[in-house]
Image (tube, rainbow, N blue to C red):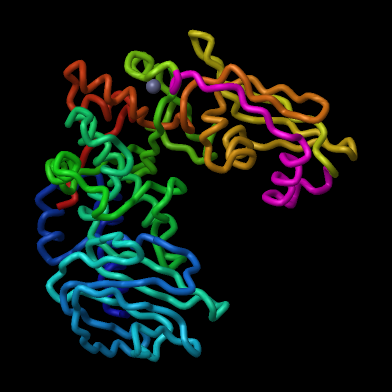
Amino acid sequence: MKILYIITALAIGLFVLWIGTGTQTAETVTTNAQSSVQFDIKVLLIENATKISFKSGDDYRIINCKTTEVTGAIGGDNFINISIDNNSIKGGFRNYNARHVILQPVQEKPFAINDNQTYRGCLELIINPDNKTMMVINKVSLEDYLKGVVASEMPSYWESEALKAQAIAARTYVLYIQSRFGKNRKWDVKATQANQMYKGMRSETMRTNDAVDATAGMIMSCWQQDWQVFPAYYSSVCGGHTESTENVFGDSFETLRGVDCPWCRMNTKPSLFYWPDAVYDKKTISDNILAKYPALKELGTIDRIETAKQSIYSGGLARTTSVKLTGSTGKTGFLRGEDLRLTVDSTGTKIQSTCCTIISLKNDVLFISGKGFGHGVGLCQYGAREMARQGNTAKQILDFYYPGNRIKLLY
Ligand SMILES: [Zn+2]
C-alpha cells in the first residue's frame, strides 16, 4: 500500500509541479505521463458501514495495506458479505486479519457492492477508530471516475458540447480538491453533492462517456501568481447572474468572479427557475444553526434572521451573501447566505438558492420569491446547455463561465 501512496503522491507532485510553471509545454507533460503517472481518485462511498455485500465476477486480489501481503480469491456470480469481526475485516467465511484492505479485480473488471451498484477500479475498506464501522472507498482512475460523475451531474441527452464542458469542469474540480485536501485524509472526495455526484458505472451512458473520452486529460487553470488548478465549481441554475466565490465559499480565484448569465432563463422550466416559498420553524432553525456553529451559542436562542449583505444584479436578481443573526441574549452574529441555506435545508431542494427574500416572523422564517437552483458559482449548467444549443463549443462555454481560464492537457 505504501507503494500505492507513493505513486499517488508522485502523481500529485508532478501535477502540482507542472501547474506551477506556466511555460512548460504539453510535450513535457506527456513525457511525465508516459512514465506511468496515473491519476487515481479515492471516492468515499460510505463513511461508516457495518457491513456490505461484494461481488467480483473476476478473480480478485486481497491486499493487506499494512503488511502489503497479497492473497488471491476466486470471483463468481454470488455476493459475499463483508463485515467486521474482532477488529478485522472479514469477507464471507474468511477473516482477512487486517483493518485496511484493498480488493482488486485481477483483470480490472467492474465489481459490485450492495444492490448491484457497479464500480470500476478497486474497493478499499478501512475500519474506523470506533472498531464497529468501516469506510468504503472506491479507488478509480480519474477518467473512469469522471464517467460516473458527468452521467450523474448532467442529463445524458443534453448537447455534447455542454457535456464536454461539464467533464472538463468536473476534472478540474476534483484535481483541485485532491491536491488541496487529499493529503490529510484517506479519501479525496465524497460521492455526494458535498463534492460531485458519483454513482459509478450504473449511471454511465454512451453519450456522457464520449464526452469524458473526447476531453481526456483536459483541465482548466487560472492565473494566481502562476497558472494553477482551481475549484471549478458549477451549479444547476444561476438565476441570471453567477456569483463570486468569496461570497459563497470564502475562497478567492480570479476566474471565479460572477458573470451575467442570460442563458439559463431561456431553457429552464419556470417551475425550476422560480421556486415555491418555503417556511421553516424558527426554533428548529436556531437549534440547527447552534449545533453546526457552536461559536454562535453565545447568542442564546436565535430570534431574528435578516439579510446583511446582498449581491444585486439587473433584472431584479438579489443573492443574499450574508445574514445577520440576533439572539435572545441581544448579541449578534453572521453567517454566509449559502451556509444558512444548507443548515436550514441540508438537501438544498426546498430553499433552492439564496436568491430570495428572507423574512423573520414571530415563530417562522420565510424564504420567498426565490430564483435559481444551487450556489451559483462558476458554470451554470442550464446556461451551458443553452449556450451549446446556440452553437457554442465547450471551450466557449468554459471561457464564458470561468473568464481568463486556460485549458491544459494532463496527458
Ligand atoms: Zn445561468
Residue 120, position in %: x, y?
A: 22, 62
Q: Is residue 150 left or right of residue 283?
A: left
Residue 12 visible (yes or no): no
| Nearest to the observer: residue 11 or residue 322 | 322
| Count of numbered badges drawn on the protein | 0
Q: Quadrant of the N terminus?
A: bottom left
Taking the spot 52% from the left edge, 22% from the top edge, the residue there is 275
Residue 272 lies in the magenta-colored region:
yes
- Give how far across and how far down residue 222 sits, in percent: 32, 38
**Residue farthest to the top, as pictured:** 315
Q: Residue furthest right?
A: 329
Residue 402, image quadrant:
top left
- Span shown in magenta: 271-299
Query: Does the magenta segment cover residue 317?
Result: no
Task: State which quadrant residue 121 falls in.
Answer: bottom left
Residue in front for this viewpoint, 399 or 300:
300
Ligand 1's image quarter is top left
Q: Quadrant of residue 326?
A: top right
| Coordinates of residue 52 in the picture (x, y in percent) | 40, 71
Tell which residue pokes out farthest to the front in this image: 78
Eyeballing the image, is 233 above or below 398?
below
Task: Describe residue 314's horizontal placement relative to residue 207 as left or right.
Answer: right
Which residue sits at x=45%, y=20%? 271
Q: Which residue appears at 43% of the width and 28% of the height?
A: 257
Above or below, 225 against 92 in this view is above
What main secondary structure does the magenta stretch of the protein show?
helix
Horizontal and vertical percent position of residue 112 = 27, 66
Q: Residue at x 27, y 35 (%)?
A: 155
